[in-house]
Image (cartoon, coloured by chain):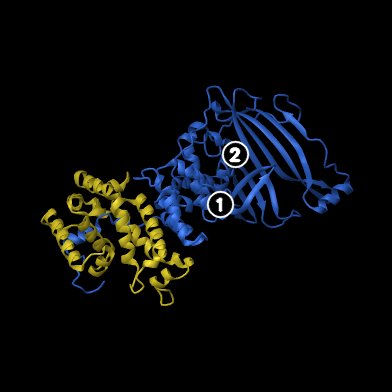
């Protein structure tokens, strides 16, 4: 953001014509987060609904907040709760079969995936991660994925989820422990996810 | 990031998680456009009082997909093939969507797609023919020595097409010279000076009653089925995904080898022509896909207001290039295509800016050639 550009608080307090700036700033990261949780189709709906909700509630935005990002992620987290079953079903399917329902028919392979051994390792990790994510409480999953996929700090997580920071810490810690226990012991030596 | 003892993502389990589904995180540009339009339509474009937005959401659907559908561009979100949870599940609600005067081309086409995509297809019974009636307004130029007289003339073409043989015409009735009128006051004066009879009776010809110089039945096309030579089977096999359709349209446009116009202009024209050739046998999902596909063409525009040709009103979306604009006209009530129009954006060759040709079409399934209903 350049200095000439208004802050998020200014955008939200300003005329409606400026609202598009907020969309340009955060739609990508919100979409990425949603798409990774529930898939591209739902992600579009969720992002649009998040901004519409934000627009309606813009009077309630804390004008002292440095950015609107945690606030927006708080909104999208609430919206995602309506799709909890969809998300869990996909994680479980990925854990069970190794095929990600969010992938559709096409599979993308890259150079790494061509190396069979690594691909197998990656698939094992992926399934383990998916199983752990499916099994963990929603609140823990929210904290974990917001932190890892969206880069929210403890403070921002607390703001987004309206939780005490101590709760954020403990949830993140427990979520990580679940992941670690689910992963094979040598998981740190290979990668996961898109290499399948 | 602040410094309150963040765990970071360097830990193995977090690094693995950071990679998980990473490639899903990047939206396609079309998706961004759809989202942007859905959001900005409600938040920025619409000049409603802000509490209206909330009320509308609660009343209409209670979820963003309502705004998405109304806002245009995003109507595809919920109903694309493979979509997981359609947010707008109630088809009846989408049927109530109408075109607003301020809606742009993407919104018009999205609403049209939503309105028509679940309509049951027309039933073409065994042995029936497709009757197509086209009324066309065009500028005819009559040369008198060094003087050119430009006259608007209407023509009516009635064709009976056999769907069992690649939409081969089996009978053609053509009426020309209807409603002649000068293009400009100068043409009116010239017509008077030359004694040109603007009220001369129209002439009609019928392929069933052949006369020298009259229309004959064209030989069956040797072309394989294509977007230009559609057959019911070919249309049924086309994808309905807008992005895939746009790829097909652009491929077809390029294959024509036309260097005068851009690929997108030709692609847009192919869709308009396809509607004019055989709209009633286009599967509803394909028609909706075509609407959405042309909505993706950069530069597509909504033509302000409504068109009116012979009392037939239309909503127009167009693509302008090289001083002219091609429009596809939709019936504002049914949102089905009803015509095509070519508009000269700038005056040239003594013809002022304005409509160059304008056709409207209608169809019926009939039991035999010659019948019209």
Callout 2 secondary element: helix
Disc on res. B370:
none
Q: Is residue B35 left or right of residue B277?
A: left
The image quarter in which residue A168 lies: bottom left
Please tell me whether mark 1 sits on a helix, a strand or a loop.
Answer: loop
Would residue B361 be visible to someone looking at this image? yes
Q: Quadrant of the C terminus of chain B?
A: top right
Residue drawn where x is 68% and y is 34% of the image: B157
Residue at point 62% right, 36% down?
A: B362
Chain identifier of the yellow chain: A
Picture coordinates of residue B203, whole percent (x, y): 78, 33
Q: Earlier in the sequence, mark 1 or mark 2?
A: 1
In three-dimensional space, the C-alpha distance between marks 1 and 2, rounded to whole angstroms, equals: 24 Å
- Is residue B127 shown left or right of residue A80? right
Q: Is residue B289 visible?
A: no
Task: Give the quarter of the image for residue B204.
Answer: top right
Q: Which label was assigned to residue B276?
A: 2
> On screen, B330 above or below B370?
below
The 10 Å Cα crowd at callout 2, few under 14, some 14 to 19, many 20 or more, is many
Q: Which chain is blue?
A: B
According to the image, label 1 marks what residue?
B100
Which part of the image, by quadrant, shows the N terminus of chain B?
bottom left
């Amino acid at each position: 953001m350049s200095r000439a550009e208004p802050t998020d608080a200014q955008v939200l307090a300003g005329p409606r014509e400026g609202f598009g700036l907020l969309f340009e700033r955060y739609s990508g990261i919100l979409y990425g987060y949603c798409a990774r949780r529930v898939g591209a189709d739902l992600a579009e709906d969720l992002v649009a609904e998040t901004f519409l909700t934000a627009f309606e509630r813009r009077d309630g935005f804390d004008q002292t907040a440095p950015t609107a990002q945690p606030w927006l992620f708080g909104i999208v987290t609430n919206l995602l709760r309506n799709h909890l079953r969809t998300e869990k079903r996909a994680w479980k399917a990925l854990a069970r079969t190794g095929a990600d329902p969010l992938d559709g028919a096409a599979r993308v392979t890259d150079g790494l995936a061509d190396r069979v051994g690594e691909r197998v390792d990656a698939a094992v990790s992926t399934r383990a991660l998916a199983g752990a994510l499916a099994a963990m409480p929603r609140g823990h999953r929210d904290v974990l994925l917001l932190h890892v996929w969206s880069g929210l700090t403890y403070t921002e997580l607390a703001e987004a989820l309206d939780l005490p920071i101590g709760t954020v810490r403990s949830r993140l810690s427990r979520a990580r422990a679940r992941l670690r226990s689910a992963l094979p012991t040598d998981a740190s030596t290979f990668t996961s996810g898109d290499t399948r | 990031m602040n410094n309150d003892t963040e765990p970071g993502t360097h830990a193995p389990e977090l690094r693995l998680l950071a990679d998980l589904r990473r490639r899903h995180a990047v939206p396609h540009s079309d998706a961004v456009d759809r989202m942007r339009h859905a959001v900005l339509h409600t938040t920025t474009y619409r000049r409603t009082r802000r509490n209206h937005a909330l009320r509308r959401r609660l009343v209409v659907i209670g979820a963003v997909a309502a705004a998405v559908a109304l806002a245009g561009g995003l109507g595809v979100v919920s109903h694309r093939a493979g979509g997981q949870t359609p947010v707008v599940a109630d088809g009846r609600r989408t049927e109530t969507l109408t075109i607003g005067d301020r809606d742009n081309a993407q919104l018009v086409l999205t609403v049209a797609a939503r309105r028509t995509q679940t309509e049951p297809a027309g039933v073409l019974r065994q042995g029936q023919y497709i009757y197509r009636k086209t009324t066309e307004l065009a500028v005819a130029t009559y040369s008198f020595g060094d003087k050119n007289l430009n006259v608007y003339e209407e023509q009516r073409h009635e064709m009976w097409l056999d769907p069992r043989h690649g939409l081969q015409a089996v009978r053609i009735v053509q009426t020309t010279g209807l409603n002649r009128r000068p293009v400009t006051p100068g043409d009116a004066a010239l017509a008077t000076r030359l004694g040109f009879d603007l009220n001369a009776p129209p002439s009609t010809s019928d392929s069933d009653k052949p006369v020298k110089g009259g229309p004959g039945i064209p030989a069956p096309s040797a072309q394989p089925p294509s977007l230009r030579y559609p057959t019911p089977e070919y249309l049924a096999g086309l994808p309905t995904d807008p992005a895939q359709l746009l790829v097909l349209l652009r491929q077809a446009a390029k294959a024509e080898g036309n260097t005068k116009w851009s690929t997108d202009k030709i692609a847009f024209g192919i869709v308009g022509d396809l509607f004019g050739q055989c709209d009633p046998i286009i599967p509803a999902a394909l028609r909706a896909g075509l609407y959405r596909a042309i909505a993706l063409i950069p530069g597509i525009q909504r033509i302000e207001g409504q068109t009116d040709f012979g009392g037939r009103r239309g909503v127009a979306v167009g693509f302008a290039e090289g001083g002219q604009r091609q429009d596809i006209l939709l019936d504002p009530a049914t949102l089905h295509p009803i015509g095509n129009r070519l508009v000269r954006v700038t005056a040239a060759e003594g013809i002022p800016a304005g409509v160059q040709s304008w056709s409207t079409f209608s169809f019926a399934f009939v039991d035999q050639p010659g019948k019209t209903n």
